[in-house]
Structure formats: C-alpha cells, structure tokens
Image: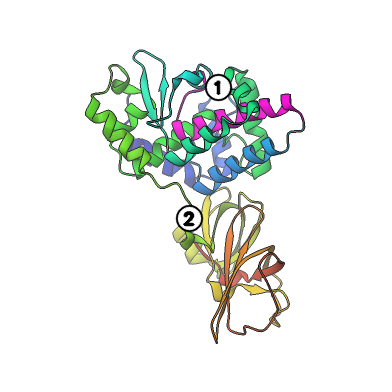
Amino acid sequence: MKQSPRDRERLEDLWRSLSLQDREWLRRRLLPADDGHADARAPLSVAECRAAEQWFEDRCAGARTVRDRQARLRLWYLFLLLRYGGLRLVEAFSLRPDDWDWSRGCLRVRGRPDRLVPLPLPLVRTLHDRLADPAFLGALASLSCDSSLMRRTFAQCGRACGFPAGLLSARSLRHNRARELRRHGLSPALVDAFLGRGQQAAAPLPPGMTALLQQRIQGEDNTPRSSARNTFSGRVLCCAPCGLACRVELLTPGGLLLTAIITETSRQQLDIREGCRLAAHVKAPQVHLAGDGCPPPPDATHFHGEVEQLRSDPRWREILLRLADGTRVCILQEDVHLPALAPGMEAQAWFGALSVILSAG
C-alpha cells in the first residue's frame, strides 16, 4: 500500500520516539535476519550531517600518498552527491565528468528519462574549485566502486561521530534530503521529481517545474546560523530520573558529553529517552571561563576551545570560543579584567547542568 508523505512523517516521528531497545526489537520482528540497517531511515540532524561531512574532509586532508588521496576524494565526492543530491548509489557510481552543467549548477543523472539535479551553489563552487587538484581529476575519472566499501566507510564515519549503528547510510542520506526539501516548502511532487521516484520519474519534467526546482534548491541557505552559538545538538546517552529531577547526558556529533538537570515533568513532556535527539541551549552569561573565580559544580560540562573573537564595553566582555568541531560558544562576562585573553589563545570553559535548557532536536 502506498504511503502518503504525511503518513511517512508520522512513522518517522514514531520511530524517533522509540528507545534503542525498542528499535532493535522491531528490527528482529519486522526485518529479515540478515538486514543490519535498523536505523537506515531514521532522520539525521543538521549537526550530524555536518559532522559526517567534516569527517570525510578531514580524512581527505590526512591522506599521505597520491593514490590514497584519490581514493578518499572519490568517497568524499560520493558522500556529497548522496548528501545533497539524494542520489541512489547506482546513480552516483554511473556519473561521469561530462554530466556536470557547471554554469547552471546542475548534475544530469542518466535514466529513463534523464533528470537534472540542481545542487546548492556553495557546494557547486567547492566541487568546481577542486578540479584544479590533479588528484581530484583522477578521482572523477571513475566513481564506480564496491558498494560494500561505501557501507564500511559509512560505518567507520558513524562510529567516529558517535552515531547509533546503522544510522548513516546512502538510504538515510537520500531519505533525509527529502525531509529537508519538504521542510523548505517544496511540494511532494517537486521532491519526487528531485529524487526521481514515483510518477514524477516516468516522464521528463516540464521546463517550468525544472526552473522552479532549480530556484528553490539553489536559493536554499546551507550555512549555520550565528544565533545558534550556544546550541548543542546530540543524542541522549543516559536518562536517569531521581525523584522530582532527572539527569540527562547528551553526546554531540563533535564528541562533547554534556549534562543537564531537568524536572521529571519536563522529561515526560519531551518524552526523553535513550537514543532520542535533543538540542541543548545555554545562555551566554551562564557559561564561565576557568579561573574566573566561580567554582564549577560537580555536574558541570567542561570544554576548551580557541578564542576567535573578543568584544567589550565599559561593563561587559563577549568572548567567542571555537571548539575543535567548529561549534562556536559565546560567553558574556561582567568583569572584563579576569582572566586576560586574546584572539588565538586556548581557553577552558564550563557551564552547570542546571543552566541547560533542553528542547526537541
């Protein structure tokens, strides 16, 4: 029976609300015994997608030989096509350099019929600039590789980023792209046309719909918002009720383990359980620098980063820390004299568990 997009959204919300144990039970009951992708259709957060993309980029930067660099660039390139193009693996493997229309920022995917896949312009510029690298040209010559290699690479990336087993896959990236496009206001028909599925894949798109799809995709803003400086997204590792309160431990894709203390009523309202995704918010004045004279409580979350920016007036000082995973944390101090800092310096900071506000991620 064909499901409507609204039915799929409801099933996804239900899946997200299940604990890891409940998901494993459903996998054993509903999926074949040799299917190891219980979380293949679970939605990924923006922070998780960004962490996976950063992992592929860091892996390319760590290559030591030309051959290794070509292999890693090929996997990085395939990941980006799956992430932003929503391609099937077989479609990505069959691409050739002449399938690019760089002037329009579109990729021709061969099929019956062919379809044009517009990609975000910042991504197109990044890929176009990489063509100056001879190693990248070698990677583009042939994208065909063993699908089991992609699965192993996704599993390695997922473990490095702290994802649940099976969460990152070609199928989950394709499904996640569809969710993103729907949230950006694209109709189900346009989303199906973008992905080449359903009735929209049976015939070429009218020129007007193709232009609309390109306009909506390439007008999409894929840059992180600065207003989310003190927002951390992650998945719940531990949720321990203790009387009227509840202790929640959250692991971010960048590896930061933070602790929040909320009321048991709030836990029930948010339906917080192990494995679910949450966002943690901390106000700038409630983030403290180590050595500022305010002792941290036992359940404080500690982290360190590089001072990226300093601003001050006669009363306040604003400090912007950049963490290792690229997250920026804003600190607002009333005493502008302690401790002395300058851009480029390393600094340690912390915030208490009672300062964390949790929301659905």
Q: Position of residue 117 (x, y in %)?
A: 39, 28
Q: How is the image coloured?
A: rainbow
From what the image shows, is residue 294 above or below residue 230?
A: below
Q: Secondary structure at mark 2?
A: loop
Q: Position of residue 260 (x, y in %)?
A: 59, 65
Q: What is the CA distance from the residue labelled 2 to the residue labelled 1? A: 29 Å
Residue 98 seen anywhere in this rendered image of the structure: yes
Q: Position of residue 115 (x, y in %)?
A: 36, 21
- Dot 2, crowdedness within 10 Å: few (<14), some or many (≥20)? few
Identity of the residue drawn at 46% across and 58% down? 270
Give the amino acid at mark 2. Answer: Asp
Give the amino acid at mark 1. Answer: Pro
* Side of 84 where 332 appears, left or right: right
From what the image shows, is residue 309 above or below residue 71?
A: below
Which residues make up the magenta segment? 65-90
As drawn, which residue projects farthest toward the bottom?
A: 314
Q: Position of residue 150 (x, y in %)?
A: 61, 25
* Residue to which mark 2 is pinned: 271
* Side of 352 where 110 appears, left or right: left
